């Protein structure tokens, strides 16, 4: 990430904003790109005064909202075959297991998966195309998409910008209090959002395991029921009267 920040510092501010919007936008369409790394590097760069934090945050939010909307349109048009092709192209990020987890999140949480998915790498990539493929109403999707994109973009940018500025003041022996407050406030909000997002993901995994257990129990029950007639047939074939045997017992 330090190399990315150093590389960005050599670019004009306008190019940095376009790059932030472009990388995050393409990532939100369903292509695995390091959008969060670019945003974090740009936010730390803003703390040094090279770029403006409001423009970094605005570019990130714009890329997230537009990219997710384009991904939604593509997913709605291409459907499940499109997701299957993406899974074959990017098996590590969008394989069957990742797709199944994302679908469970949408099935259990609806558009809230879009909002909190902005803070989870997997759902950040799949939210738009998957919502389109599952025919989630676009107005509901857009509301959750815009809210999640704005909170993620501005929250991440200003958290890192504030921490960077406070650290700079601390190094100049100006204020410990500003550094502590900025770090605690930023880490607290980020911790809560990430915990909520990962809790959603954990609930989905637990639900998937429960469904698998029910299926196995049903299958084993069916085998037991099917085995009972087989025992009776074996007894008849060996010359044993089942009714008489029962009376003897």
Image (cartoon, rainbow, N blue to C red):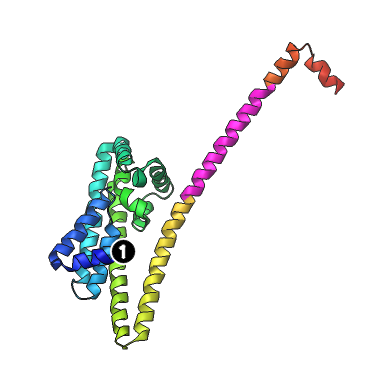
User: Residue at 44% of width from left, 57% of height from top?
Assistant: 198
User: Residue at 21% of width from left, 70% of height from top?
Assistant: 54
- Up-down: is 11 above or below 112? below
Query: Camera-side residue: 129 or 161?
Result: 161
Quarter residue 245 falls in:
top right
Say if the magenta span includes residue 206.
yes
Left/right placement of residue 228 relative to residue 32 reads right
- Up-down: is 105 above or below 239? below
Quarter containing the C terminus: top right
Image x and y of residue 34, in percent: 28, 56
Q: Main secondary structure of the magenta part?
A: helix
- Up-down: is 86 above or below 158? above
User: Which contiguous range is marked in magenta?
Assistant: 204-228
Residue 150 in sight here? no
Q: Which class describes the residues within 10 Å of circle 1: few (<14), some (14-19), or many (20+)?
A: some
Quarter residue 2 falls in:
bottom left
The residue indicated by pointer 1 is: 151
User: Residue at 27% of width from left, 48% of height from top?
Assistant: 31
Image x and y of residue 71, in percent: 25, 47
Q: Residue furthest front?
A: 3
Say if the magenta span includes residue 76.
no
């Amino acid at each position: 990430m330090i190399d990315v920040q150093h590389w960005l510092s050599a670019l004009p501010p306008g190019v940095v904003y376009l790059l932030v919007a472009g990388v995050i936008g393409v990532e939100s369409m369903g292509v695995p790109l390091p959008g969060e790394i670019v945003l974090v590097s740009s936010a730390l760069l803003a703390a040094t005064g090279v770029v403006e934090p409001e423009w970094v945050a605005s570019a990130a939010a714009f890329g997230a909202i537009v990219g997710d909307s384009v991904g939604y349109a593509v997913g709605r048009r291409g459907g499940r075959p499109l997701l299957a092709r993406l899974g074959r192209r990017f098996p590590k990020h969008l394989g069957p297991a990742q797709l199944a987890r994302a679908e469970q999140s949408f099935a259990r949480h609806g558009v809230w998966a879009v909002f909190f998915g902005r803070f989870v790498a997997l759902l950040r990539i799949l939210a738009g195309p998957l919502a389109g493929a599952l025919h989630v109403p676009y107005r509901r999707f857009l509301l959750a998409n815009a809210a999640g994109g704005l909170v993620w973009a501005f929250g991440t940018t200003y958290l890192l910008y504030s921490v960077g500025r406070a650290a700079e003041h601390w190094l100049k022996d100006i204020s410990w209090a500003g550094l502590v407050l900025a770090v605690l406030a930023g880490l607290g909000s980020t911790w809560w959002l990430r915990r909520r997002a990962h809790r959603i993901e954990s609930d989905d995994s637990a639900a998937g395991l429960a469904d698998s257990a029910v299926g196995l129990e049903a299958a084993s029950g069916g085998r037991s029921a099917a085995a009972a007639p087989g025992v009776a047939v074996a007894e008849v074939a060996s010359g044993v009267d089942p009714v008489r045997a029962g009376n003897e017992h």
